[in-house]
Amino acid sequence: MNFVRNSASAILASSLIAATAQAQISNNEIRIGYLADMSGTYRDLSGPGGLEALKMAVEDFGGTVDGRKIVLFNADDLNKPDVGANTVRQWIDERNVDMVTGLVASSVVLAASKVVEQGGKLALISGAAASSLTNEHCSPNHIHWTYDTFALANGTANAVLKDGGKSWYILTADYAFGHSMETDIKKVVQAEGGSVVGAVRHPFPSSDFSSYILQAQGSGADVIALANAGADTVNSLKTASEFGVTQSGQRLAGMVVFLNDIHAMGLDVTQGLMLTTGWYWDMNEETRAWAERYQKRVGSKPTMVHAGIYSATTHYLNAVKQTGSDDTATVRAQMAKTPVNDMFAKDGRIREDGRMVHDMYLVKVKTPAESKGEWDLYQMVRTIPGNEAFRPLAESQCKLVAKN
């Protein structure tokens, strides 16, 4: 009799726990918003392909979390901060979106992340580069996943400096991301005994880089660093090729270069370019298998941003499942205490400043003769351990980092 009573009590307790967990999923749905440049300068590095990567993560999770449907919304931010901020505000106020991801142009992300924080929701940033997002602009409501300007400058600039590139001229996109990258490049170059002899800022986006490249050529610098991204980087490199920059003895350092950029320009133009990436499709069997699935859906290999969106979303959904909640603080705490081990990163970890720390990779673009296929574009040079790649917490200005 006692056994029956105890068993009934246990079942009742389990039912109450399950009911409580279910009640913690607001609206009985997990609602995710995907915000990105879907039609402009950054379309190819994230854009529609990033939305497909997000859908893959949701589908691989079964479309639900403990029977609660995962619902997606998406929008084109047009690379305009006001559009991005207003879209996220509407999602939060009218659709009760729990998490926003994608998030590419740093100016848009800075505006949108403030709205996310005010609304008490969560943002998983995979596309934006500005390292200030986990430094002076850090927040308990966003996590920076894939890469940042500090890691890219640290990896690429260090490699070029060690190879003899001592004097630098910087071509910068004139908005938050470009400014952050320019600052990080200067810090690395000067710390390693090099010098920055000049810099010029171009409007974002731009189509004509002739005058900027001519100024860079005229500086006589060993290295011309491109602190821009997407179509701006592609156009910069094409112009530099037309003007014979490398033939005259100067080097080009593409600080934020993506796989789709190299593919679009071709190996004849980009061969030998050194760059840093957070992920590459051909690293191992796991990355190749995921990239093949992605390519069947999209028609191209994924960039590190696409892989980062999949990884961040999967980690988030696992945390929702493990906690039985979509409450921001609860989910973020679970994400932070759980190592990231998937096809994107091994032993990745989320620090108190919101930076997901993982290994980065220095690569060199192959020559046409070295490439064995359309997307066989990178030669791995070295792995940069996560604790070396990203800004040390000792140098952080983030309000969330305890100071000794």
Image (cartoon, helix red, strand yellow):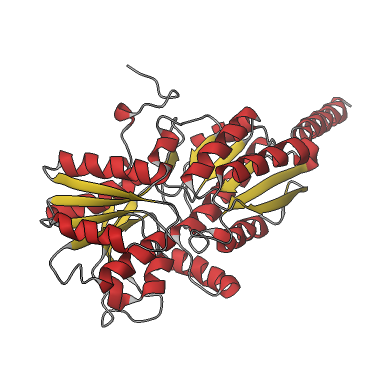
Number of residue marks: 0
**Res. 284 visible in picture:** no
Q: Residue at x 23, y 69 (%)?
A: 272
Q: Residue at x 71, y 45 (%)?
A: 31
Q: Position of residue 8 (x, y in %)?
A: 86, 30
Quadrant position of the N terminus in the picture: top right
> Toward which corner of the image does residue 122 lie, by quadrant?
top right
Q: Nearer the viewer, residue 267 or 384?
A: 267
Q: Residue at x 72, y 44 (%)?
A: 30
In the image as oriented, which residue stretches furthest toward the right?
Answer: 1
Please state if 323 lies on the left or on the right of 363 as rendered.
right
Please state if 62 lies on the left or on the right of 312 as rendered.
right
Q: Nearer the viewer, residue 291 or 5?
A: 291
Q: Residue at x 46, y 31 (%)?
A: 138
In the image as oriented, which residue stretches furthest toward the top?
Answer: 404
**Res. 113 visible in picture:** yes
Question: Is 262 drawn above or below residue 256 in the view shown?
Answer: below
Q: Position of residue 127 (x, y in %)?
A: 48, 51
Quadrant position of the C terminus in the picture: top left
Question: Is 363 drawn above or below residue 133 in the view shown?
Answer: below
Q: Position of residue 336 (x, y in %)?
A: 50, 35
Please state if 28 lies on the left or on the right of 217 as rendered.
right
Please state if 14 lies on the left or on the right of 321 as rendered.
right
Q: Position of residue 219 (x, y in %)?
A: 16, 54
Question: Is 260 drawn above or below residue 399 in the view shown?
Answer: below
> Toward which corner of the image does residue 76 lie, by quadrant?
bottom right
